[in-house]
């Protein structure tokens, strides 16, 4: 049984966020759907009157609290925060990556998540009621070529989640991190590969990956756990995906090359 009345979901305009909003509202929660794209939020909000669209950019310096306070009750008090907004940009090796892409990932995946959490957490602690669910990634645990800053931001999300858990000691506020692996039916790869349809196609070719519904189901499960139980971390992969193992370069050239 869900013991929470309201949820705020960032990155609500597509993929995981969109599905999470739909599912939680269908279970009777009042859901604040946060994203930058007004048209997508309007489309989502039409699906259920319990969904309140809130246009907000997590990378802006505006405090989200000022916007939430203006919403009609019960939307003005958030019980469950789902920090879902995040992105990957590029999958080139570090030596070829664009610094602008690195900056954008840090701004969104780290700073955006921090700012929203910092704004909402004090009220949860004050009321001794709340749940923060951070969307991490398998990339935060398992390195892969070209995962560089994306994986590092998700490692941050995981460690920040653990540290939050320690800070919440002595309160009833819960915190979990969900770490999905390969996921389909989201904008993730289109964004990462900047619309390169061939690259996107190759990522999902002949696979059955995690769907946004799988993630929404997991969120619903987490917020339905009994008050005494905190699931610290959930790592999810499709059955078709597994660990890659370590790699070895044979006959490696260790000599310095002329400039
Ligand atoms: C998404 C998983 O493997 O594309 O966070 O980095 S992966």
Image (spheres, rainbow, N blue to C red):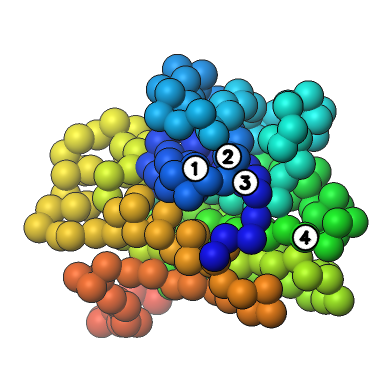
- At x 29%, y 31%, the residue is 195
Disc sitting over residue 25 in the figure: 1
Instruction: State the image coordinates of residue 249 (x, y, percent, origin top left).
Output: 29, 78
- At x 38%, y 69%, the residue is 236
Task: Indicate the secondary structure of the residue bearing disc 2.
Answer: strand
Mark nearer the N terminus (2 vs 4): 2
Within 10 Å of disc 4 (Cα), the crowding (few <14, some 14-19, many 20+) is some
- At x 69%, y 79%, the residue is 228
Residue beneath label 4, please?
129
CB under 8 Å between discs 1 and 3: no
248, above or below 181, in the image: below
Q: Is residue 222 visible?
A: yes
Within 10 Å of disc 1 (Cα), the crowding (few <14, some 14-19, many 20+) is many
Residue beneath label 3, please?
7
Give the Cα distance between marks 2 and 1.
Answer: 6 Å
Residue lying at the far right of the rendered structure: 126
Task: Indicate the secondary structure of the residue bearing disc 3.
Answer: strand
Residue beneath label 2, please?
31
178, above or below 38, in the image: below
Residue lying at the far left of the rendered structure: 206
Q: Is residue 107 visible?
A: no
Task: Indicate the secondary structure of the residue bearing disc 4.
Answer: loop
Give the Cα distance between marks 3 and 4.
Answer: 12 Å
Mark nearer the N terminus (2 vs 1): 1
């Amino acid at each position: 049984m869900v013991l929470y009345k309201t949820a705020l979901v960032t990155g609500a305009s597509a993929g995981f966020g969109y599905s999470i909003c739909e599912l939680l509202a269908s279970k009777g929660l009042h859901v604040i759907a946060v994203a930058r794209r007004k048209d997508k939020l309007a489309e989502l909000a039409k699906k259920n009157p319990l969904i309140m669209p809130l246009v907000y950019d997590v990378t802006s310096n505006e405090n989200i609290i000022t916007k939430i306070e203006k919403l009609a009750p019960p939307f003005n008090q958030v019980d469950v925060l789902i920090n879902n907004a995040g992105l990957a940009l590029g999958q080139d090796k570090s030596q070829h990556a664009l610094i602008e892409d690195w900056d954008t990932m840090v701004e969104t995946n780290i700073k955006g998540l921090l700012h929203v959490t910092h704004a909402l957490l004090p009220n949860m602690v004050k009321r001794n009621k709340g749940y923060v669910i951070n969307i991490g990634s398998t990339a935060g645990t398992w390195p892969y070529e070209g995962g560089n800053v994306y994986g590092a931001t998700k490692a941050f999300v995981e460690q920040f989640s653990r540290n939050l858990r320690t800070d919440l000691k002595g309160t009833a506020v819960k915190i979990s991190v969900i770490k999905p692996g390969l996921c389909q039916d989201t904008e993730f790869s289109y964004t990462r590969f900047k619309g390169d349809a061939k690259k996107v196609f190759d990522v999902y070719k002949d696979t059955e990956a995690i769907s946004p519904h799988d993630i929404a189901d997991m969120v619903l499960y987490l917020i339905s756990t009994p008050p005494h139980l905190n699931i610290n971390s959930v790592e999810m992969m499709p059955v078709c995906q597994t660990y890659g193992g370590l790699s070895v370069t044979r006959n490696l050239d260790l000599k310095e090359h002329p400039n």
